[in-house]
Image (cartoon, grey):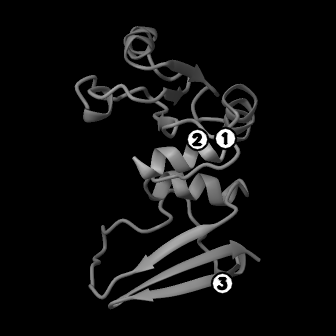
Amino acid sequence: MKYRRLRKKRGLAEYNLRIIVSGSGSIKPRAKIFQHKFSPLIILTTHRAPKKVVERLRILATEVKVFGKKEINFVAALRWLRKKWKVRRLLCEGGGELNDIFFRKGLVDELHLTVCPKIFGGRDAPTIVDGKGFSRLADALPLKLKSMRRFGDEMYLVFTPA
C-alpha cells in the first residue's frame, strides 16, 4: 500500500508496467503473469513468432509489439516504450542472453549485482552474460563501482559502465 502511494506521489502509475520478451513468442498462456491483471502487460517479440501465436498473445496481453525479424531490435523497442508508455527507467530481470544483448548494444546504465556466500558453478552453469558474451578480455565491458552495501554476509554492488 505504501509503495503504491509513493509511486503516485512521484507522478508514476500505481503499478509497474510489466514487459515480457520472447523472440519466438513461446510463452505459456497459463503462466502466472497472465493470472493477475493489475497493470499493463506488454509482450515484445519478432517476426519469427508465428501469426497464430501472436494473435493468442494479443488476447492475453495489453499490447504485443513486433520489433525485428529474427532478433528483437531493443534500441527501437526502448524508443517505442519511452514514447508510447513513458518508460524512463527499466529494470531487466532476464537471463544471461538478454543481459548479453543489452550490454553489447550499450543499453545498460547500471548493473545491480548481489554477491552471496554460496559457490555455484560448473561447465553449464548460467552466468550474468551468456549468449555471445565477450570472448576476449580486451573486448570486455569496463565497469566502475558506484556503490556497495553489506547486509549480513551478502554484498549489494552497483556498477556503471566506465
Q: CA distance from mark 3 to mark 2?
A: 31 Å
Q: Which residue is mark 2?
A: 8
User: What's the mark number on residue 145?
Assistant: 3
Q: Residues within 10 Å of mark 3 (few under 14, many from 20)?
A: few
Label located before the other in sequence (3 or 2): 2
User: In the figure, is residue 161 to the left or right of 102?
Assistant: right
- 111 over 38 or under it: above or below: below
Q: Residue at x 36, y 25 (%)?
A: 37
User: Which of disc 3 and disc 1 is earlier in sequence?
Assistant: 1
Q: Nearer the viewer, residue 84 or 106?
A: 84
Residue furthest out toward the left? 30
Cα distance, mark 1 to mark 3?
30 Å
Mark 1 vs mark 3, foreground winner is 1
- x and y percentages locating residue 105 in the rendered image: 71, 53
Disc 1 packing (10 Å; few <14; some 14–19; many ≥20): few
Give the residue displayed 71% in from the left and 78% down from the top. 142
- Residue 119 position within the rendered picture, expressed as x and y whole percent measured from the top left: 27, 85
Q: Quadrant of residue 104?
A: bottom right
**Which x, y percent locates residue 79?**
75, 35
Residue, disc 1: 11
Q: Check whether the beta carbons of the residues at disc 2 and disc 1 lie within 8 A of each other.
A: yes
